[in-house]
């Protein structure tokens, strides 16, 4: 009876059928590949392809890929990767293009006060939700007084619009029943 002990290759290396651990190629010219490879955990029999939008720090095949500018790295814990010796790792880095590429500076760093996954959230006391600002760049929140004033002005403008529209419509028709458009009737009656 032969005792066989499985020796896992360390991070950055892989082993196929033979017993020698080999370093994962980190540049496309190594091993005539179109992409760089890595192994960020012990014991893998193949190297992973470095995802588009990422790089290996210092071209270290044992490192986890980092996001380039305009991309964001997310840990995907739904992936099960089985090692050569039967171990299981439950995560893998997933690189995604940011919805607003100008907010993602690389290495999961965000522009200004932006934070969170793909830099779409804001730090405390900051907002990116202005009425006409779709840039998603975070800026300080307005004071409560400023918000109340905006709300009151909006209500006043709406009341004035309804008043002016109703006056024009009443001048134009002999009675409210004779108004031509249903939208105008709804505006005046409600």
Image: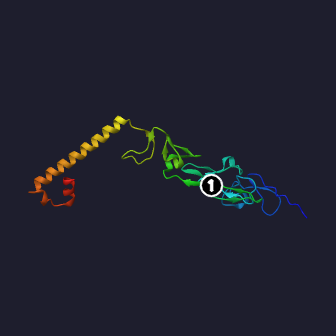
Q: What's the image's color scheme?
A: rainbow
Kindly identify the residue that appears in the image at 50 percent across and 46 percent down.
103
**Drawn side of residue 45 relative to residue 177, left or right:** right
Number of labelled discs?
1
75 or 187: nearer the viewer: 187
Image quarter of the N terminus: bottom right
Spot the residue most to the front: 190
Instruction: Locate residue 174: give its quadrant.
Output: bottom left
Q: At which x and y percent is residue 128?
A: 43, 44
46 or 89: nearer the viewer: 89
Q: From what the image shows, is residue 80 above or below residue 160? A: below
**Drawn side of residue 129 relative to residue 174, left or right:** right
Q: From what the image shows, is residue 53 above or below residue 130? A: below
Instruction: Locate residue 144: give its quadrant.
Output: top left
Q: At which x and y percent is residue 63?
A: 69, 49
Residue at the disc numbered 1: 77
Spot the residue most to the left: 174
> Few, some or many C-alpha atoms within 10 Å of disc 1 (few <14, some 14-19, many ≥20)?
few
Q: At which x and y percent is residue 134?
A: 41, 48
Name the secondary structure under disc 1. loop
Kindly identify the residue that appears in the image at 28 percent across and 40 percent down.
152
Q: At which x and y percent is residue 120?
A: 49, 47
**Drawn side of residue 11 relative to residue 153, left or right:** right
């Amino acid at each position: 009876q032969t005792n066989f002990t499985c020796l896992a290759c360390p991070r950055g290396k892989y082993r196929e059928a033979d017993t020698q651990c080999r370093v994962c190629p980190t540049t496309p010219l190594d091993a005539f590949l179109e992409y760089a490879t890595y192994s960020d955990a012990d014991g893998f029999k193949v190297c992973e392809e470095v995802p588009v939008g990422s790089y290996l720090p210092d071209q270290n095949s044992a490192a986890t890929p980092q996001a380039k500018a305009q991309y964001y790295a997310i840990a995907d814990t739904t992936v099960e990767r089985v090692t050569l010796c039967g171990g299981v790792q439950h995560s893998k880095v997933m690189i995604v293009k940011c919805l607003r590429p100008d907010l993602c500076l690389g290495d999961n760093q965000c522009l200004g006060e932006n934070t969170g996954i793909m830099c779409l959230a804001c730090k405390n006391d900051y907002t990116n939700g202005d009425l006409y600002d779709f840039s998603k760049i975070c800026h300080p929140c307005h004071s409560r007084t400023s918000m109340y004033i905006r709300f009151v002005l909006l209500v006043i403008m709406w009341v004035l619009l309804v008043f002016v529209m109703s006056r024009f419509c009443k001048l134009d028709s002999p009675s409210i029943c004779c108004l031509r458009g249903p939208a105008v009737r709804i505006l005046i009656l409600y």
